[in-house]
Every structure is written in structure tokens, then in C-alpha cells.
Amino acid sequence: MSMLTLTILLLFRGFTFSAAGNCEVCVDFLYRLYGSLTSAHKELTPSLVDEELIQACTAAEGKEARLCYYLGASSDAATRITASVSQPLASHVPIEKICQRISSRDTQICQLKYECQLKDLRSDGLKRMRVLELRNILASWGEECRGCLEKHEFVSLIQKKAPLHVPGIEL
């Protein structure tokens, strides 16, 4: 094997490990699952973890529901790799390591990211956003800006509708 090929393989391997390190949806979801399991049960078994995972996935929404689909813990999933989560979790393997291992099976797991949360909807912050992001904000609220052509029209509608959808938000 040539030195160039070896270097390329090592670089590629390093990129996959670094990408697995920031599986924010996987890590957050499994941390909450592990916390609820350890607080409710003294001893963890793979079957218990599997049951609790499926139960947690029935209540999951958004990106976490997509994660459950990829893991096979949702009712409409095509494949099932919950054992790759339940056995290591029952053995108290670190969550980051579990997510890293399952991302080697399905790379989409670590590509899941939470949507950024709106902290304040002041005019200057909204004006920096793209129109697509403004439309997504309105869509997440179930609102639509009919006849909006300019960015300032989206901004004014968001500021007008924000008190209805986001309690306690700064304008």
C-alpha cells in the first residue's frame, strides 16, 4: 500500500470520527433516556432499555422522531437496530460512544441537527436572516405570509404574530 493511500485512508477515518462526535440529537435524546432509566431502575437490562426506548420514541417529535425512525424504534420504521442502543446503554457505555458506533451503520443519525431556537425577535436580528428562514419560522407557527414579496414584510408579520406563538419573547 502506498504512503499516499494510507494517508488518505487515515484522513478519511479521522473525519468520520470527528463527525460522529457532534451527533447532537442522538446524544441529547439518549442522555435523557439514560437519565430517566437510571432514576427509575436500579439495574438495567437490554430488554428494559429497549422497551423504554420504544416508549420514549412514541412521544418524540421533530428531529428526535426522525432519530427513532433511523433506529427502528418507531412503528413505521423499515429496519430495527435498537439492540445497537439498548445493549450498550444497559452496560453503561458512554452515550457519545454509542452514537459514534451507530453512526457507522447509518450516517444520517449524526447528520440530524436541532433547529436553532429563537431567543429574541428584534427587527435587527430578523433582518439578518434569510427569507427562507423567516418563512420556516412562520410555517412552524402555522402561519403564512400571503402576498409578501419583500423581506421587511416577513419581518413585520413575524413581529406581529410572535406574542401569540412565543410567550415571554423580547421584541
Image (tube, rainbow, N blue to C red):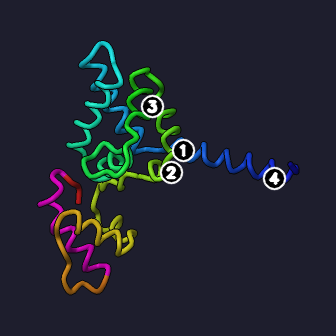
Q: Nearer the viewer, mark 4 or mark 3?
A: 4
Looking at the picture, how far across and down is residue 157, in whole percent?
20, 73
Looking at the picture, how far across and down is residue 156, in whole percent?
22, 74
Query: Which SS class for mark 3?
Result: helix
Query: Which SS class for mark 1?
Result: helix
Return the residue at label 1: 104
Q: Earlier in the sequence, mark 2 or mark 3?
A: 3
State yes or no: residue 157 in magenta. Answer: yes
Q: Nearer the viewer, mark 2 or mark 3?
A: 2
Return the residue at label 2: 107
Query: Which SS class for mark 4?
Result: helix
Q: Are marks 1 and 2 in contact (CB under 8 Å)?
A: yes
Real-space Cα distance between discs 3 and 1? 15 Å
Q: Residue at x 38, y 30 (%)?
A: 86
The disc placed on residue 5 is: 4
Q: Nearer the viewer, residue 20 or 76?
A: 76
Real-space Cα distance between discs 1 and 2? 6 Å
Task: Assess disc 2: are there few (<14), some (14-19) or many (≥20) residues with their C-alpha within 10 Å of its C-alpha.
Answer: some
In this rendering, the answer to whether 58 lies above or below 45 is below
Query: Which SS class for mark 2?
Result: loop
Q: Are marks 2 and 4 in contact (CB under 8 Å)?
A: no
Task: Assess disc 1: are there few (<14), some (14-19) or many (≥20) residues with their C-alpha within 10 Å of its C-alpha.
Answer: some
In this rendering, the answer to whether 165 lies above or below 149 is above
Residue type, numbered disc 4: Thr
Q: Earlier in the sequence, mark 4 or mark 1?
A: 4
Looking at the picture, how far across and down is residue 12, in whole percent?
68, 50
The disc placed on residue 95 is: 3
